[in-house]
Image (spheres, rainbow, N blue to C red):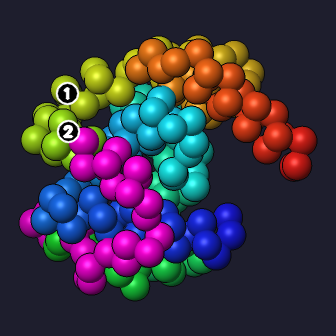
Amino acid sequence: MTDFDSKKLTELVLYILGKTGGVDIYHAFKILYFAEMKHLAKWGSRMVPDEFCALQYGPVPTKLYDAVKELNHPRMALSTELSAVVKFAGEDAPNILLPKRDVNLKFISKSEIEALDQSIEENKTATFGQLMRKSHDEAWDEANRRVNGSNIISPLSMAKVLNPDEAILEYIEEQIQIESALK
């Protein structure tokens, strides 16, 4: 993960926390997942510089999840970046994330704000069970069923859940091929 990617991911989290007043880790991850899905389906581009993996309770941004787990004792660059601007609410609410500062909107585009706002509005008050059922979509199922393979959810599969135009799907597929060739 580049320094820019780390800053971008941190600002996306801060945006969610600022708009909600703070949410639990599960809600933050699902809001991010559904915003990413919306952005992919409408614009054909990713906004989250992380990969979502299909885990038991739904999609999780992998690097962000690892960073949040070590928030109080950061070892990797992303957790160090995150711990400077995000904190846990405390003993009574150990999974609630709170912002330490306002978001820097220089890292988030207008189209990303639109996707985030829609996702926040749709998901901020959903229960754990509602979010789990909603996030166990076709993209999650496809990644979860892989045998001896990666449980990483494809951006193309995420977009397909929302039935975008065929041109958007072709564009996403081309972008995936380009990224793969550059690795």
Q: Secondary structure at mark 1?
A: helix
Residue 65 locus on image (x, y percent): 47, 55
Q: Secondary structure at mark 2?
A: helix
Query: Which label sits on residue 90?
Result: none
Residue 70 locus on image (x, y percent): 46, 69
User: Which of 12 and 42 lies nearest the eye of the viewer?
Assistant: 42
Distance of label 1 from label 2 (alpha carbons): 12 Å
Measured along the vertical axis of the image, is residue 103 above or below residue 152?
below
Disc 2 crowd rating (10 Å Cα; few below 14, some 14-19, many 20+) is: some
The picture quadrant where one finds residue 115 is: top left
Q: Name the N-terminal-most of marks 1 and 2.
A: 2
The boundaries of the magenta stretch are 91-118
Observer-side mark, 1 or 2, equals 2
Residue on which disc 2 sits: 123
Residue 46 locus on image (x, y percent): 56, 45
Disc 1 crowd rating (10 Å Cα; few below 14, some 14-19, many 20+) is: few
Measured along the vertical axis of the image, is residue 54 above or below residue 18?
above
Query: Which label sits on residue 129?
Result: 1
Q: Residue at x 44, y 75 (%)?
A: 106
Please give the count of numbered marks on the rendered protein. 2
Is residue 125 visible in the rendered image? The answer is yes
Q: Is 145 in the magenta?
A: no
Q: Is 117 in the magenta?
A: yes
**For this view, does 40 lie left or right of residue 28?**
right
The picture quadrant where one finds residue 148 is: top right
**For this view, does 127 lie left or right of residue 87?**
left
**For this view, does 74 lie left or right of residue 29?**
right
Q: Residue at x 31, y 49 (%)?
A: 114
Residue 90 locus on image (x, y percent): 17, 73
> What residue type is disc 2 on?
Asn
Q: Residue at x 18, y 36 (%)?
A: 122
